[in-house]
């Protein structure tokens, strides 16, 4: 008795498994035979084909391949394939051409996404907002307000909020607190200083240290080991690497080293040379008697992000001549993360007074002069200790 029951269960289980496999591999559809009035469960046709003849009592469903420009994207019981009807619109390209199993697939060009049949440009997050999700061909950019301690000073479809510069970690003080739209500004610690018109990097220091943009990025470690005095800490170097691109890293390393070694003989000599240079800079820009209108025109003539009238007005109140121009140029460099000397070379001088135009040109020539190159040589040959000509250093 138990053997009969066991055998029956085995047979039923086999039938169940067989049907499950068949249903999984080949979905069914019902077909009524008009001649016999019988109802058959026929196999559907796989993707890329259609039903040419329904199944009967004697034969299975007969499938045929979809003709050119037609497709079937799934198992089906259709008597014909669908026509490849999709046409790519303006600002779209064909991501996948029509084939037997797929309709033509279109996609918006880079920088745009599909919205109600139109390819719209990805939203650019304004200053104070950062990108938390990049736009795709199917979705727009997602922006979010920069949280405390973060900022974004540009309008961009791909820039995230960045952390404020940590002045304490760099061994300098905070000159201006950062907010959601601009970074913190750091400044050298100067004991007993009562100045209110200070600059974190002078034009002469920038002219001197700008040679570093031509050095390979892997020089950072080499230079650190060769600099005399207090060695820049590894965490400070790591911070520089994380917050500045390769061209800026050596430049910021020299600034930090100079600030930490102001009492070292090599640095003292370097500071003396820089002070001589700064007297030359002052000579080129003193006695210009610039008004707020003139200074605003100067700032608006520089490339990149502009320094507004409010900054010009506050600088006029804070600084005496000729520090007004130097302070505004310093603000421009900070805002643009750029090379002030290069910015002055690209200055559009049409709206500037003739005297100011001439002085700026002379100032640029002075900062690119042989004297500055000699100071550059002195830094490499005396302070760092290389005994080769600067032109040959790239080969070392």
Image (cartoon, rainbow, N blue to C red):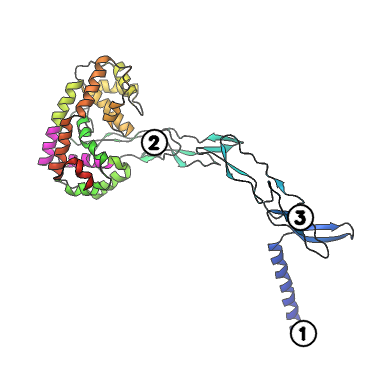
Alpha-carbon distance for marks 3 and 2?
Answer: 60 Å
Please give the residue where the numbered disc 3 appears in the rendered image.
Answer: 51
- Looking at the image, do the residues carrying marks 1 and 2 touch, with CB atoms under 8 Å apart? no
Q: Nearer the viewer, mark 1 or mark 2?
A: 2
Give how far across and how far down residue 48 sits, in percent.
Answer: 68, 53
- 51 vs 133, left or right, is right
Residue situated in front as seen by the camera: 70 or 35: 70
Q: Earlier in the sequence, mark 1 or mark 2?
A: 1
N-terminal of the two: label 3 or label 2? Answer: 3
Residue 133 horizontal side relative to residue 359, left or right: right
Q: Is residue 88 left or right of residue 320?
A: right
What residue would you read off at disc 1?
1
Q: Quadrant of the N terminus?
A: bottom right
Prevailing secondary structure of the magenta residues: helix
Residue drawn 16% across and 41% down? Answer: 389
Q: How many marks?
A: 3
Residue 254 belongs to magenta span: yes
Label 1: few (<14), some (14–19) or many (≥20) C-alpha neighbours in 10 Å:
few
Residue 51 vs 245, above or below: the answer is below
The image shows residue 325 at horizontal and vertical percentages of: 25, 23
Query: Horizontal and vertical percent for residue 106?
Result: 59, 42
How far is disc 3 from disc 1 in space, using C-alphas?
48 Å
Numbered badge on residue 152 = 2
Query: At which x and y percent is residue 392?
Result: 20, 43
Tag 3–tag 1 contact (CB < 8 Å): no
Left or right: 95, with 248 as reference point: right
Q: Nearer the viewer, mark 3 or mark 1?
A: 3
Q: Which stretch did the figure color magenta?
A: 249-273
Q: Kindly state the secondary structure of the residue where label 3 is placed.
A: strand
């Amino acid at each position: 008795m138990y053997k009969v029951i066991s055998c029956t269960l085995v047979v039923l289980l086999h039938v169940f498994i067989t049907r499950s496999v068949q249903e999984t591999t080949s979905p069914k559809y019902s077909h009524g035979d008009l001649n016999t009035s019988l109802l058959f469960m026929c196999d559907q046709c796989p993707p890329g084909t259609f039903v040419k003849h329904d199944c009967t009592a004697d034969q299975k469903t007969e499938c045929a391949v979809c003709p050119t420009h037609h497709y079937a994207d799934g198992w089906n019981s259709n008597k014909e394939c669908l026509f490849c009807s999709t046409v790519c619109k303006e600002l779209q390209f064909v991501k996948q051409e029509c084939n037997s199993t797929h309709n033509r697939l279109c996609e918006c060009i880079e920088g745009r996404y599909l919205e109600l049949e139109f390819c719209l440009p990805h939203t650019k997050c304004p200053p104070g907002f950062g990108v938390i999700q990049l736009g795709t061909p199917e979705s727009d950019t997602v922006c979010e307000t920069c949280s405390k301690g973060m900022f974004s000073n540009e309008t961009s479809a791909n820039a995230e909020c960045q952390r404020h510069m940590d002045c304490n970690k760099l061994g300098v003080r905070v000159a201006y607190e950062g907010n959601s739209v601009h970074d913190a500004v750091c400044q050298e610690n100067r004991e007993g200083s009562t100045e209110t018109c200070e600059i974190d990097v002078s034009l002469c220091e920038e002219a001197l240290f700008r040679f570093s943009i031509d050095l390979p990025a892997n020089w950072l470690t080499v230079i650190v080991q060769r600099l005399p005095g207090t060695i820049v800490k590894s965490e400070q170097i790591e911070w520089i690497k994380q917050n500045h691109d390769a061209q800026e890293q050596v430049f910021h390393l020299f600034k930090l080293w100079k600030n930490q070694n102001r009492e070292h003989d090599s640095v003292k000599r370097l500071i003396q040379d820089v002070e001589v240079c700064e007297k030359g800079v002052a000579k080129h820009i003193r006695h210009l008697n610039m008004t707020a209108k003139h200074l605003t025109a100067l700032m608006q003539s520089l490339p990149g992000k502009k320094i507004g009238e409010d900054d010009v007005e506050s600088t006029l109140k804070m600084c005496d001549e000729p520090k007004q121009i130097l302070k505004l140029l310093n603000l421009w460099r900070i805002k643009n993360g750029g090379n002030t000397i290069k910015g002055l070379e690209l200055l559009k001088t049409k709206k500037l007074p003739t005297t100011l135009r001439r002085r700026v040109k002379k100032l640029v020539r002075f900062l690119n002069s042989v004297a500055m190159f000699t100071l550059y040589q002195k830094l490499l040959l005396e302070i760092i200790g290389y005994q080769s000509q600067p032109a040959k250093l790239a080969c070392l």
